[in-house]
Image (spheres, rainbow, N blue to C red):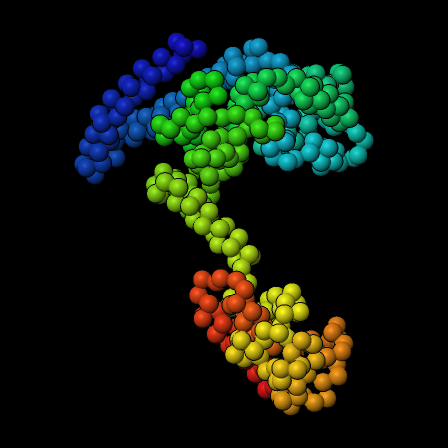
Amino acid sequence: MEQNLREFGELDFELREQQPEVDAACKASKKGGVRNAAAEMLSTEWKKLWLDAMGLQSSLDNQKALLEEMKRLEGWKWEDWKERYVEWNDHAKARVSDLFRRIDRLHTGNVPRQVFIDGIIGSKFPTSRLEMEKVANLFDKGDGMINAKEFINALRFDSANRNAKPQTDTEKITHEIERQKKTCSCCTPYQIEKISENHYRFGDTHIKRMVRILRSTVMVRVGGGWESLDEFLHKHDPCRAKGRLNINMFPEARPTHALDSMRAFTKNRHAKEAGLPTTGTPGPIMKIREKTDRSVPMSGGLGGTAGYTVTTTPDHRPSRIPRAPSDMSAGKLSRVGSTSNSKGSLFDSPSRPDSRASSEAGDKQQTQQTRIPSLRGRKGQRYGLGLKFQRFY
Ligand SMILES: [Zn+2]
């Protein structure tokens, strides 16, 4: 084989060397305007020679590939193939039974050997015809048929076996990293290089990252925290990071901790807001109602301080009745009864928020230090007014 290739290389070289000479001869014959039979023949023969050479080259290439594949398959083991195939199926979320349902046209449970081989090759599983012949040999009982159930069971037994075998954490990490490496489809595969036990280098960076197992998930140390290996690769491996922004793919490019500090900030803000009276916070009407329900007992007594609540006379303040007059003054006489007596009625519920909202703004102002008391008071008032408008117009 080696010699064949070498000889072919020499032939190819000679052909190329003599090409100008032949070209010149052909040209010269045409220039004279006289058809030179010898030149024509030379030209035709020369072309034929080239075609033969090309045919020889492709057949040599095929033979070479076949030899390489045979070499690769020398120590071929069903277990290795099985593991690869089961893993590939996991990754592709394909089911072998689906494959058989597709290729077993007659639903006999038996598939002709060639159909089986074509089916698996057609499913894009990286294998070769030569390798598939070896697989088929294991299941072909001499009748040229592959039994689907037998094949699937053989795979299943293996996957159970595979789950039983793990291992120490380090072995699990190595196994998972190898598995993830195989799923990379980049032209130049994404590099994951083991530096020491539990330390790996990812991609082109020189950052050494710690890797460990946390509740059976492989985690990668990122910044001050941990990220699952899968998540990490979806950000950094180009073939998995489709549609992502560069800033996500290359976190080194942005200020360190930029994202982290932002997250922390938002969290704190939310926490504070939850603790504070939400009186001044702009938001839907529902929000105001929520808060006012809490402050029912105080609304009467302190309502006036907000500057808005329309509690009328001092005698009325301690009870909930005082708010009835406010409604009355607003021209909703018919509702007075319901406002003061039936708390849960649908009808009067919209009338409560505004007066309570403002009154609470008032009492919070007194009982609790807010950062900008005056603003909160005014805001509450504004909301009260907004509600009124909504109600009456
Ligand atoms: Zn990749």
Tell me if 206 is positioned left or right of 278 in this view. left
In this picture, residue 305 sits left or right of residue 190? right
Out of 295 and 154, give the one closest to the viewer. Answer: 295
Q: Is residue 263 above or below residue 45?
A: below
Q: How many marks?
A: 0
**Residue depicted at 60% across the width and 77% down the height:** 355
Q: Nearer the viewer, residue 137 or 297?
A: 297
Residue 128 in view: no
Q: Is residue 153 left or right of residue 15?
A: right
Instruction: Farthest residue to the right: give it.
Output: 108
Residue 67 appears in the figure = yes
Residue 123 on image: x %, y %: 62, 33
The answer to which quarter of the image holds residue 140 is top right
Q: Nearer the viewer, residue 283 or 93?
A: 283
Percent coordinates x, y for residue 357 in the rendering: 58, 72
Q: Residue at point 56% right, 10% down?
A: 74
| Residue 258 position in % (x across, y down) | 39, 45
Residue occupying the point 63% across, 31% down: 90
Q: Which picture quadrant has residue 171?
A: top right
Image quarter where the C terminus lies is bottom right
Residue lying at the far front of the rendered structure: 315
Where in the figure is residue 296, as x and y percent of width and height? Answer: 66, 69
Task: Please determine whether, in this image, residue 234 is positioned above or below residue 355.
Answer: above
> Residue at 42% across / 32% down in the picture?
187
Q: Locate the N terminus and report the quarter of the image it occupies.
A: top left
